[in-house]
Amino acid sequence: MKQANILITGATGNIGTTLAKQLSAQGIPFRAMVRTTDDQARALHALPGAEAVIGDFNNPDSVASALQGIEKAFLLTNSSEQAEKLQSDFVDVARHAGVQHIVKLSQLHAAPQSPVRFLRYHAAVEQKIRESGIDYTFLRPNLFMQGLLGFRDPIIQQGKFFATAGEAPISLVDIRDIAEIAATALSTPGHAGKIYDITGPESLTHQELATKLSIALGRTITYVNVSPDQLLQALLQAGFPLWQAEGLIEDYAHYARGEAAAISPAVQQLTGHAPRNFDHFIQEYAALFA
């Protein structure tokens, strides 16, 4: 088998797993960095062309070992208060290991002066990669359609979901389209120095999402706009760390200001097909909300 020269971090998360499956299906060998040899890691290792290696962002030596012989790396960590430092440390290790190209999962409107902490940390890591001299591709997706699965319990139990998005339209994107662009950037030339804003094909309000959910599920689903404090308390009760819960409140304020409504042509241009729309998404995921 051909030697893998691509490393996927965040390989057991939704996007990382989807990316791994897409590379495997295309016959492109890759290495997946995992923290433990659990069922998810074993499933990754079983994919044709895959190699799972143990590595932890908190352990630079293990990261350096995972990066041996790697030319291109997909950079993704869990959303946490340590994410900026962990990703920045990864860049340092990657530079010493001779990595030539980093494809970083960022976020739409990443900017150092943003009021949204997630957008500030992504911008800081982007700048770190620029300064490293390593070729880069920054993927900046909008709100994930699969994020709706976080509202699964209240949708099932109450026929409702709650947020602070107001009446602002948002060009949500399916993570499978994000992963497909990541696979393209990692496996084909011409993406160095590029920043790709990644959105779905339409901008929808949360009320419109509720209407589409109602049609797909055959019962009434209602979107309830709540106050930021109400959402914060609900997130904390659900077990979110304070830093992340407050960050999500900032994210939703950004959405509510109408700053995430623009539609990008990136999916069509880079994959050759139109981005998946919300109707397509909910038809495929409807059973999870039953």
Image: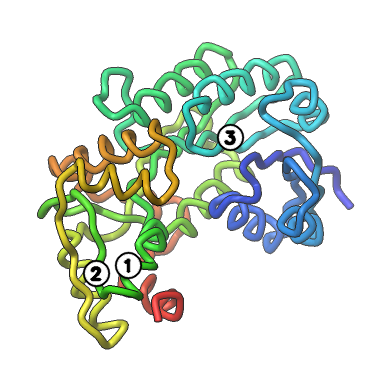
In the image, what residue occupies the spot 76% across and 34% down? 55
Percent x, y for residue 44? 74, 56
Q: Are marks 3 and 1 in contact (CB under 8 Å)?
A: no
In the image, what residue occupies the spot 20% across and 81% down? 220
Residue 290 vs 184, above or below: the answer is below
The secondary structure type at the circle numbered 2 is strand
Percent x, y for residue 129? 53, 19
Q: Using residue 231 as the reference point, say whether residue 147 is left or right of it.
A: right
Query: Is residue 268 at all visible to an observer of this figure?
Result: no
Return the residue at label 1. 154
Question: Label 3 sits on what residue type?
Answer: Leu
Return the residue at label 2. 160
Percent x, y for residue 221? 22, 75
In the image, what residue occupies the spot 35% across and 62% down? 151
Residue 101 vs 213, above or below: the answer is above
Return the residue at label 3. 75
Dot 3 alpha-carbon crowd within 10 angstroms: few under 14, some 14 to 19, many 20 or more: many
Percent x, y for residue 37? 80, 49
